[in-house]
Image: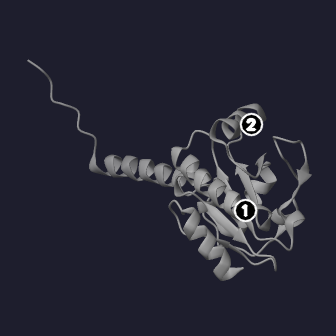
Amino acid sequence: MKGPAFRPPIVLTILLLTTCCTLFLAGCIGTAPYQAREVGSGDAWKTIELRDVQTGEVFSVASFSGTPVILYTFTISCPICTLQQKEISAIKRELGDSIAVIGLDIDPKEEAAALKDHIRRNGFSGYYAISPPGMTQSLVDRFGPRVVTPASAPVMVICPGGDARLLETGIKTSAQLSSLIRAVC
């Protein structure tokens, strides 16, 4: 014959559930590096020095003042990013030196050699750099966390006067980008 099954008192059960829920929720509201923030207006990201992985040239977004700039973030392993890069390279070929194109690899694990190979394999145009952590954080501070969500195909347009905007999510065709640059810059 078996003894009676142990049943914890209801107060103990409620206390245990409350503790578990509190611990679970505490993990959800902690401070993650790219936690959603109010979109700011800081421009530090414009002057951070970057190094082009193809040429070794040091540049910044501000280096292209007077020229419209298409700035976008990506990772090598993101297929959506690669599709967006193809559209951006097409507009660069179409508009030539009348625009600047800057691609920032935001994956801290990716290396310059892998990025160079990715550019070469796909025939991409423009400047490409591994984004330093300060640049990535500054972009998040200015544009919000969507700028570091590669699957949303983040693209920013910076006009010659310095006005900068993050475009809507999703792949933007070269025709859409060309029309937008003409309309806002």
Amino acid found under the numbered disc labelled 1: Leu
Numbered circle sitting on residue 116: 2
**Is the residue 140 above or below the residue 128 in the image?**
below
Residue 82 pos. (x, y %): 57, 46
List the single residue furthest toward the top.
Answer: 1
Residue 27 pos. (x, y %): 54, 50
At 50% from the left edge and 61% from the top edge, which residue is drawn?
Answer: 170
Numbered circle sitting on residue 139: 1
Q: Alpha-carbon distance for marks 2 and 1?
A: 23 Å
At 28% from the left edge and 40% from the top edge, which residue is drawn?
Answer: 8
Amino acid found under the numbered disc labelled 2: Lys
> Dot 1: few (<14), some (14–19), or many (≥20) neighbours within 10 Å?
many
Residue 18 relative to residue 161: left or right: left
Residue 40 placement: quadrant:
bottom right
Numbered circle sitting on residue 12: none
Residue 114 placement: quadrant:
top right
Note whether residue 142 is visible.
Answer: yes
**Is the residue 165 above or below the residue 140 in the image?**
below
The number of discs equals 2
Residue 57 pos. (x, y %): 91, 47
> What is the secondary structure assignment of the residue under circle 1?
helix
Q: Classify the position of the C terminus by image quarter.
A: bottom right
At 69% from the left edge and 40% from the top edge, which residue is drawn?
Answer: 119
Q: Nearer the viewer, residue 77 or 7?
A: 77
Q: Nearer the viewer, residue 176 or 149?
A: 176
At 54% from the left edge and 62% from the top edge, which residue is drawn?
Answer: 173
Q: Which one is in front in this view, the residue at disc 2 or the one at disc 1?
A: 2
Residue 29 relative to residue 33: left or right: left
Considering only order in the chain, which callout, 1 or 2, is on the residue closer to the N terminus?
2
> What is the secondary structure assignment of the residue under circle 2?
helix
List the single residue furthest toward the left.
Answer: 1
